[in-house]
Amino acid sequence: MADHPEPATAALRDLATLRARFVRTLEAARGPAPAPDPLPYADDLLRRWQEPQRRYHTVAHLTAVLDRIDTLREHADDPDVVRLAAWFHDAVYLPDRSENEDRSARLAERALPEAGLPEAKTAEVARLVRLTVSHDPADDDRDGQVLCDADLAILAAPPSAYAAYAAEIREEYHFVPNDAFREGRAAVLRHLLGLPSLFRTPHGAREWEATARYNMRAELDLLSI
């Protein structure tokens, strides 16, 4: 029987893979001009994604979003800019604060020009990060549609994975009393269910929409018990 890697070894391997993905993405987005070493920027972002207050918004979530962007890349105008937005979209995450998306966007606006990304692409990354407040991209916003679909795809997970996601969100908000959490979580679910379409790319609409709505309605029913 083949040996299985120790959890710590596997985790380090996963981080190394993520680090390499960031390097490829940044180098592709910024072009051939001389620019700073991408690794310190990757390491800063990975450190942020491993902060102890996170339960769902972890490197596992980042990896899943990046994988889904790869699935949806044909629907994006600039997949590498969308990937950079994924790296930054929850880079600042404090569950007791309401301005995480804006602070994450401002982090991108500071770090990416220093890392050699052109001004226009930096502005687009920041715009995409701020779009994850509403997850409601315009009909002609192909990059926004890809990022939002990738971020929301967890809603279409199989029941056990969806239940684990919901439990991890509750853990992140452990400081919120049960009644207040139920009310707030229900409001988020109702907002999403009230959107004409949760998923805007053809793939997302076809593969994820119906399952996501089923999962969220089931969670709403549980919250009302």
Image (tube, grey):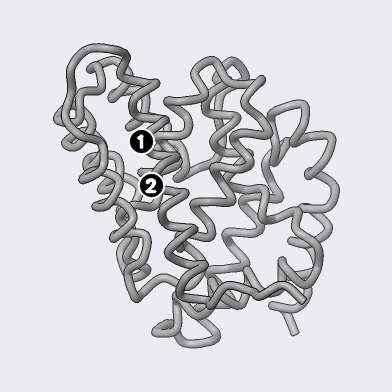
Residue 1 lies left or right of residue 22; in this view the side is right
Q: Return the residue at label 1.
A: 23
Nearer to us in this view, 39 or 123: 39
Residue nearer the viewer, 214 or 74: 74
Tell me the residue at 45%/36% (across/down).
131
Of all residues, the one furthest to the front in this rendering is 1
Q: Amino acid at mark 2?
A: Arg
Q: Position of residue 94 (x, y in %)?
A: 32, 66
Label 2: state its secondary structure.
helix
Q: Quadrant of residue 39?
A: top left
How far apart are the alpha carbons under marks 1 and 2? 6 Å
Is 1 placed above or below 135 here?
below
Asked if 73 appears above or below 187 in the picture, the reply is above
* Quadrant into which the N terminus falls: bottom right
- Residue 58 numbered tag: none
Give the residue at x 61% y 77%.
167
Q: Position of residue 141 (x, y in %)?
A: 55, 20
According to the picture, the residue beneath numbered tag 2 turns out to be 19
Query: Which kind of residue does numbered mark 1 sit on?
Result: Val
Which residue is located at x 46 percent, y 87 percent?
A: 177
105 on left or right of 156: left
Tell me, yes or no, if residue 219 can be seen here.
yes
Q: For the residue labelled by badge 1, is the local secondary structure a helix, a strand or a loop? A: helix
- Is 53 rendered above or below residue 142? below
The residue under the point 39% across, 84% down is 175
